[in-house]
């Protein structure tokens, strides 16, 4: 074997080893990510299960309500960051809608109205109007459950055409749409711009 052939063989081996190393690193990263996501799901589910008995007691204790809102706000951050599988997001948002009303700009609350006696009515959220005001302490959560006239019309159309279960799904989609647009809120956009300026100044 000539020196040239030896170098070519070593080059091939190095390429194979490099590709193998990258593949191993990628699989390790995916495994770590999946494990972390799994832990997040378990943690949030366990916290909700601990809170469930307290949330079933009316009137709601302020401490239980505060813990629930903090949990919901944290979960919305995971949703917004695409940190969890979509089925989990859909299921958890549907659960939130059993406690937190969609709210119109005038401050009134939206609830589904059964179209027929056989329709499944929407659960009546146990949060009082006073409790709903606590949402203002959680901007992401507050924004996510706002209801525009356009979104309300879409829910009503789905309700008339497909019934309350489909309308409930449309309500979940409304919250998801709100979360996607929340990133474009003036406060957050200004915050990102300011950080870019600060980082540029630091790099000089």
Image (cartoon, rainbow, N blue to C red):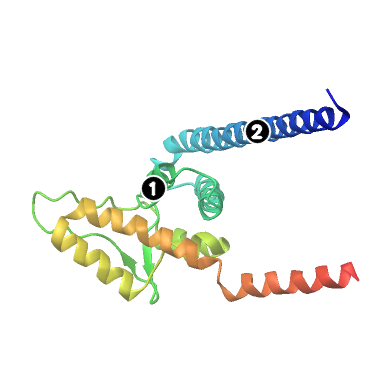
Q: Is residue 84 visible?
A: yes
What residue is drawn where x is 55% and y is 64%? 139
Please state which of residues 98 and 160 is positioned toward the viewer in this rendering.
160
Q: Specify few, some or many for label 2: CA neighbours under 10 Å numbering under 14, 14-19, or 20 or more.
A: few
Q: Percent position (x, y) of residue 18?
A: 74, 34
Q: Estimate the spatial distance between the alpha carbons at disc 1 and disc 2, rounded to whole Å.
A: 33 Å
Q: Is residue 93 above or below residue 128?
A: above
The tag on residue 7 is none
**Element type where label 1 sits in the image:** helix
What residue is drawn where x is 24% and y is 59%? 112
* Residue that sits furthest to the left in the current view: 117
Q: Percent position (x, y) of residue 67?
A: 55, 46
Q: Is residue 133 visible?
A: no
Q: Is residue 120 above or below residue 45?
A: below
What residue is drawn where x is 36% and y is 48%? 94
Q: Percent position (x, y) of residue 2?
A: 85, 26
Q: Which residue is mark 1?
A: 90
* Residue that sits furthest to the front in the current view: 2
Please state which of residues 59 and 177 is positioned toward the viewer in this rendering.
177
Question: Does 42 sit left or right of 118 as displayed?
Answer: right
Q: Earlier in the sequence, mark 1 or mark 2?
A: 2
Task: Name the quarter where the N terminus is drawn.
Answer: top right
Q: Is residue 52 above or below residue 93?
A: above
Task: Name the quarter where the C terminus is drawn.
Answer: bottom right
**Element type where label 2 sits in the image:** helix
Q: Which residue is mark 2?
A: 23
Q: Nearer the viewer, mark 1 or mark 2?
A: 2
What residue is drawn where x is 12% and y is 59%? 115
Cβ atoms at labels 1 and 2 below 8 Å apart: no
Q: Specify few, some or many for label 1: CA neighbours under 10 Å numbering under 14, 14-19, or 20 or more.
A: some
């Amino acid at each position: 074997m000539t020196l040239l052939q030896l170098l070519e063989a070593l080059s091939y081996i190095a390429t194979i080893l490099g590709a193998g190393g990258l593949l191993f690193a990628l699989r390790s990263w995916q495994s770590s990510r999946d494990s972390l996501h799994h832990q997040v799901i378990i943690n949030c589910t366990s916290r909700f299960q601990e809170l469930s008995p307290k949330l079933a007691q009316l009137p709601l204790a302020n401490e239980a309500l505060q813990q629930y809102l903090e949990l919901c706000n944290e979960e919305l951050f995971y949703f917004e960051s695409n940190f969890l599988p979509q089925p989990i997001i859909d299921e958890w948002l549907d659960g939130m809608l059993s406690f937190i009303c969609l709210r119109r700009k005038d401050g009134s609350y939206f609830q589904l109205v059964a179209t027929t006696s056989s329709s499944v009515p929407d659960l009546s959220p146990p949060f009082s109007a006073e409790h709903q005001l606590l949402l203002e302490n959680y901007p992401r959560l507050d924004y996510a459950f706002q209801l525009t006239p356009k979104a309300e019309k879409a829910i009503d159309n789905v309700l008339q055409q497909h019934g309350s279960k489909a309308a409930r799904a449309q309500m979940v989609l409304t919250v998801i749409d709100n979360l996607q647009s929340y990133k474009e809120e003036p406060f957050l956009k200004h915050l990102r711009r300011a950080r870019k300026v600060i980082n540029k100044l630091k790099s000089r």
